[in-house]
Amino acid sequence: MALYVHKYGGTSMGSVERIKNVARRVAKWRNAGHQVIVVPSAMSGETNRLLGLAREIQKDPDPRELDMLASTGEQASVALLSMALQDLGVAARSYTGWQVPIRTDSSHTKARIKSIDDARVRQDLDAGKVVIITGFQGVDEDNNITTLGRGGSDTSAVAVAAALSAKECLIYTDVDGVYTTDPRVVPEAQRLGVVSFEEMLEMASLGSKVLQIRSVEFAGKYRLPVRVLSSLTDPLISLDDEARSGTLITFEEDEKMETAVVSGIAFSRDEAKLTLVAVPDKPGIAYQILGPIAAANIDVDVIVQNQSIAGTTDFSFTVNRVEFKRAMDVLQNTVLPAVGAREIVSDESVCKVSIVGIGMRSHVGIASLMFETLAQEGINIQMISTSEIKTSVIIQDKYMELAVRALHKAFGLDQYQASNASS
Ligand code: ADP
Ligand code: ASP
Ligand code: MG
């Protein structure tokens, strides 16, 4: 007997029939003698529907009220799933984030989990109940409801699994694992049997929305095994087969994995580029520009500073597109008057495409194959950023899918033979 945390995404919870299937699957694990905590998302489309209503009422709603609203989607899900389990004769109990409580900081709409109280949950588990906890939400010190950012139920699930030392966190979703790239964009994408924690961290941070980045960070911090698998199979398939399916995020880098130089292509359309033209090239300039951006709690991604010509330089950086307007305001109102640049140029139609692989550490020429491939497609690279195991480029977003397909092919990922030793 072991403790497992199951997470079910929006599509997996998308209808009454699907919720009943989730209950059947959970009942199978419970009846095999395991303890199970389930963390469901809101039913598909529900979070968007709620946020849409908010924006019909007010252009720029108060983030506290947005959280109050958006968190309700998950509250409906936990209650419905609890009913579905009880209908199957399985004892179950649902909780919202504040009831557990899952404590977070106060950054509304992108809060971070600080601690999870496991007392109530343990009591229920010990009494033989399946515990169902809302994904995506928590509560701050002043008892305000907070949410963890889009896709945040992944993080709730992994954090709960870590807090209760679960054996594994199973992320059930609408694809049967982590692929070499989004299979909806490249049909030739191949499923990875295992993916290293570091690669998954890069892929998630570079835009692969199959896992929210913070969930991968939690998995790494607590070395918690996480598996991504399908919720759309027959819920009554053998538990052993199911427990071995999908993609396991592993902390061991074996030799087999080293042979795949590049194991994934990630992309993100959520980018916007800002450039300060002709800023004085002197010590402290990067701090003068990015300090106020950081103070406004805006994450900066790729940064490029050009060679200075006649004492001035151009300074460019990218931010998430949803934070573009705020970043522009900070530049115009705070930075420009202080540093005296000639002008600010911006581009909201850029995207980021990245190749990821731990094998890049020990191979040369990988980035140059990337640049060659993009050149052959006539795609102009605007910015480049590299780390030990990834290379990212900023390009015009109309070329994104073309770039991803061409790179997938150039790096042999169409033929990738994944190690399926994921158990
Ligand atoms: P859920 O609602 O279950 O949280 P998401 O939509 O958040 O599901 O994440 C699953 C989706 O992630 C898939 O449907 C797929 O389109 C997308 N995705 C992006 N990159 C990848 C990848 N490398 N492997 C698998 N899926 C990916
Ligand atoms: N329901 C939230 C969202 O749509 C959280 C999640 O699905 O993970 O972003
Ligand atoms: Mg998700």
Image (cartoon, rainbow, N blue to C red):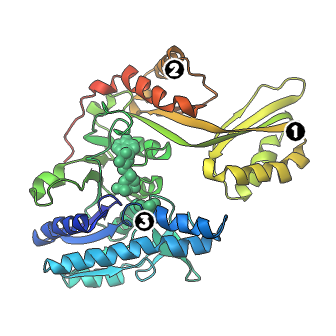
Q: Position of residue 264 (x, y in %)?
A: 39, 34
In the picture, residue 385 is in which quadrant? top right
For residue 374, the mark is 2
Give the mark nearest the N terminus, 1 or 2. 1
Q: Are marks 1 and 2 in contact (CB under 8 Å)?
A: no
Q: Which residue is mark 1?
A: 341
**Distance CA(mark 1)–CA(mark 3):** 44 Å
Give the mark nearest the N terminus, 1 or 3. 3
- The residue at 22%/54% (across/down) is 232
**Left or right for 164, reference 218:** left
- The residue at 46%/22% (across/down) is 366
Tell me the element at label 2. helix
Disc 3 residue: CB within 8 Å of ligand 2: yes
Tell me the element at label 3. helix
Crowd around label 3: few <14 · some 14–19 · many ≥20 (10 Å): some
Q: Are marks 1 and 3 in contact (CB under 8 Å)?
A: no
